[in-house]
Structure formats: C-alpha cells, structure tokens
Amino acid sequence: MTDVINTREIVLAVLNEVLEEDKYSHIVLREVLEKYQYLEKRDRSFITRVAEGTLENLIEMDYIISQFSSVKVSRMKPAIRNILRMSVYQLKYMDSVPDSAVCNEGVKLAQRKGFFNLKGFVNGVLRSVARNLDKVKYPDPKEMPVPYLSVTYSMPEWILNRWLRLYDFETVETICKGIHKDHVTTVRCNLNKASKKDIMESLRNQGVTVTEHPYLDYALNLFDYNYLKALDAFRNGWIQVQDVSSMLVAEVAAPKWGDYCIDVCAAPGGKSLHLADKLEGSGFVEARDITESKVKLMQDNIERTALINMNAVVADATVFLPASEEKADILLADVPCSGLGVIGRKPDIRYKMTEKKQEDIVKLQRQILDTVWKYVKVGGTLVYSTCTIGAEENQYNLKWFLDNYPFKLESIDPYLPEELQGKTTRAGYLQLLPGIHESDGFFLARLKRVSE
Ligand SMILES: C[S@@+](CC[C@H](N)C(=O)[O-])C[C@H]1O[C@@H](n2cnc3c(N)ncnc32)[C@H](O)[C@@H]1O
C-alpha cells in the first residue's frame, strides 16, 4: 500500500511550484499525476482534491490561519505556509480525514522538509484551528461586502471591485458561486464522423454518464469517466473537449459552404476544428498560433479528426502578413486574455493575474486587432472573443475597435439558443457568466467589415 505521508509531500510540492514558482496548477498536476501513475486511485484522488481544494480556497485558508498565528502568512517560510494551507483545507473541507491525523501529518511534513525548529509552531497553529474552526468570524456581507466575497469565495478584491462596477452584489456572488461549483466536462460531437446517437451509445457502453447540454444539440456533458483519451469516441475523433461557450464562436461565425477562414490565435484548436467541421469538407480554415509546440497540438487534433480542409501554421498575429490582406470571409480573433472566465477550471489564475498584467494584455489584444482586421474581406465577418469577464478586455476593446476601424456590430440572435438572446446579443455581443449561464465565463462579438 502507498504511504499516505508521501501523498501529502506530493501535494506540498505541487503547491510550492504553483504558488512560489509561478507555474500553472493544471499543468503541474497533470505532470505529477503522469509521474505517479503507479499510485493507487485513492491516493491520486487525494492529491488532486487537496491540491485543487487548497488553491480554490486559498484566500479563505489564509484568513483562517491569520486568526491563529502570531506570524503573518505572507512572512512565513513558503513551505510552512503551504503546509498550513493544505492542512487547514483538510480540517475545514475533508471530514474523512481525522483532525488529529491532519495535525500530526502537517507536523511530520514540516520536520521532513527540515524545519525542526518550526514543528511546535505548525503544531500550535493547526491544533488551535482544529479546536476553534467553528468560531472563526467571517466578514459581514452587509458591512464589508468586498472582504466578505473575497474570503468566502477566495477571490482577490481587485477582481471583485471590477465586477462590482458592472454587476450588482447578488450577481457577483452568483458568479463567484458558479466558479466554485464542480465543473463538468463538455464535448462537441463531430457529426460528420458519427451520429449523436452512436456517439452517446459508445460513451455509455464504456461506462460514461452522458447528458445533453441545453444550449446546443451537439454538445454533451460527460461524467464518471476515468481517462478521456482512452474512450473510443475520443480516439475515433468523434468528440472534442470544448466548453459550450467556445462552441458558440463557430455558431456565431456561421461559415457558409466554401468560406475561407483565418483563426489568428487558434491553439489548441477547438474553434478552428469546429469551423472546419461546419464547412463539411469545403472551404478552408487556416489555424495560426505563435509557437511550434502549440501548432503541433493542433496538428495532432487535425490528424485525429482527419479533417481535410484545415491546416495549422506558426504566425505571430501582431505581424502583418500582406498575403492575407482581404482574404478572409471569416476571421476569428480569440485573443490571449486574463482568463478570469475559466477560474473554475484553473483556480490559480486569479492569484497570478494583476491589474498591471491585465493592462499589458489589453495592449496586446489591441495590437492583434490593429494588425488582423485588414485580413477580412469587405462584407466579411470578424468574431472577437475572450474567456474572461470584465469590461476592459471585452466591451471597452469592442468600443475602441468600432471607433477606429471600418466595422459594425451585427445581431447574433439568429445564431443563439433563445435563452441566451437579449439586448446585447441583438446589438451583436454576449457576455456569458458562470453561475448565471451554463458555461464558463466568455465574451464574443460579431462584426462585419463595411468598407476599405
Ligand atoms: C485563448 S487562446 C486560443 C484558444 C483557441 N482559439 C481554441 O479555441 O482552442 C489564445 C492563444 O493565443 C496565442 N497567442 C498569444 N500571442 C499570440 C500572438 N502574438 N500571435 C498569435 N497567437 C498568439 C496563445 O498561444 C494561445 O494559444
């Protein structure tokens, strides 16, 4: 049997890499689980649950620790604060682990990492937390709405303040709750390869629970599977993992038979593959991205799905390519963004993003738009999208673009399910919000080039 102590050491290594070395949790966890494939399923689940849970609740963990520690969390040794964080997460959210075991294992871990002199400190803080957890006072939602939301949902205050400028308190709380709830895997059926009935049957035969997504007929939610890449439907290229928000991009782009499409920020390729699928072998999709490794990801996907009307190439979207001028019937600008709409799947994004980083991202988004708009034919379509929430990268960018370039917004109602239609979609754009819509947070707009 696997030693339980090792699993905690692995969790600590993950937290140290994510929080102290600026690596992304979904990548670090994927690497760790691949490396420790030999561990029992129970141990792998423990590692995932404690690492992800600690990250999802990081601000709350620090808030609790700060009530029982004489040393500020920010001044602690990184390994010690991460041992405390992951231990407090287990005390608060994992009834299956006895409190005494959590405290003992936390102390042992500190010792194993060479902090003999801090064993007493770790022991003292953890035992105080274990005894007094139910007495911790949280900020009052009426008197301190922003700290309340921040601690309860572990959301940095600057992000909340931005959202509160756009939405009322209840809406922001609903968004935060939506981010916190469990996230399902959604896949798009490649209906050119197999019928939805056959795809569902194949998945169910392999023990997967499948439900239909309310927004799009070809979108399925999958539950209870162990390893997606081992499923026949995936191996046969019948399904593509994609959030429904991202599927709406190809819906809104609405390619016609024979259209030439350019996707200027395309990797790993979900939206390009979808466009190519919609073109039913006609037309062409040129999927571009900035690095070889990202383009390789798309090439693998093209091969798996056996598409004949798409290729993937390296190209920097901030560098003008004269050969593309006025060539595109449809141009997708699914630009790099702060990613605040997918925090539910990538919990640490929120702690790594800053106002300054976001400003730089907005500059890059505008630089890309300023370069690629000329690729659109007069009368052609540009779809702008981000997987983020907030006006800076979405509505303000859209306004800036409309003020400076020969494009106008077009209603996207004809392409959307009825429940998503409203004032803004009639005007030409949509902001999807977790908790409110059944999707990640996402923004998309459809623009038509009206002149030279
Ligand atoms: C939001 S992701 C695209 C997701 C993709 N459209 C999909 O549906 O799978 C943004 C992409 O922009 C790429 N990117 C960043 N800077 C770029 C640049 N200057 N030129 C081209 N691509 C860039 C990133 O590598 C990243 O893959």
Image (cartoon, rainbow, N blue to C red):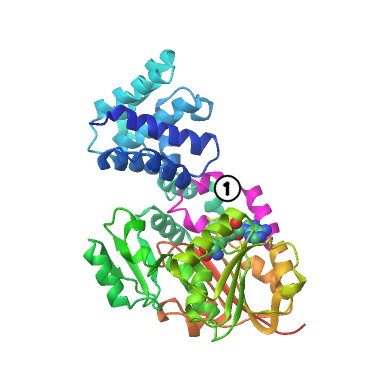
Residue 142 position within the rendered picture, expressed as x and y whole percent measured from the top left: 43, 50
403 vs 442, left or right, is right
Question: Between residues 141 and 283, which one lies in front from this camera angle?
Answer: 283
Q: Is residue 304 above or below residue 411?
A: above
Q: Could you tell me which secondary element the residue under label 1 belongs to?
A: loop
Find residue 38 and report its image quarter: top left
Question: Between residues 48 and 80, which one lies in front from this camera angle?
Answer: 48
Q: Quadrant of ligand 1?
A: bottom right
Q: Which residue lies furthest to the top in this view?
A: 117
Residue 314 position within the rendered picture, expressed as x and y whole percent measured from the top left: 64, 60
Callout 1 amino acid: Met
Question: Between residues 149 and 36, which one lies in front from this camera angle?
Answer: 36
- Magenta-drawn stretch, dominant element (helix, strand or loop): helix
**How many neighbours does mark 1 have within 10 angstroms: few (below 14), some (14-19), or many (20 or more)?**
some
For the question of whether residue 387 can be seen, the reply is no
Is residue 180 a member of the stretch shown in magenta?
A: no
116 vs 399, left or right, is left
Please state, as top left, top right, bottom left or bottom right, where the N terminus lies in the image.
Answer: top left
Find residue 114 and report its image quarter: top left
Residue shown at the point (58%, 59%) measured from the top left: 295
Residue shown at the point (41%, 78%) measured from the top left: 192
Find residue 109 and report its image quarter: top left
> What's drawn in magenta, residue-wise?
340-366
Q: In this view, does 238 lie above or below 290?
A: below
Residue shown at the point (53%, 41%) measured from the top left: 23
Is residue 357 a member of the stretch shown in magenta?
A: yes
Residue 98 position within the rendered picture, expressed as x and y whole percent measured from the top left: 23, 31
For the question of whether residue 97 can be seen, the reply is yes
Q: Mark 1 points at which residue?
A: 353
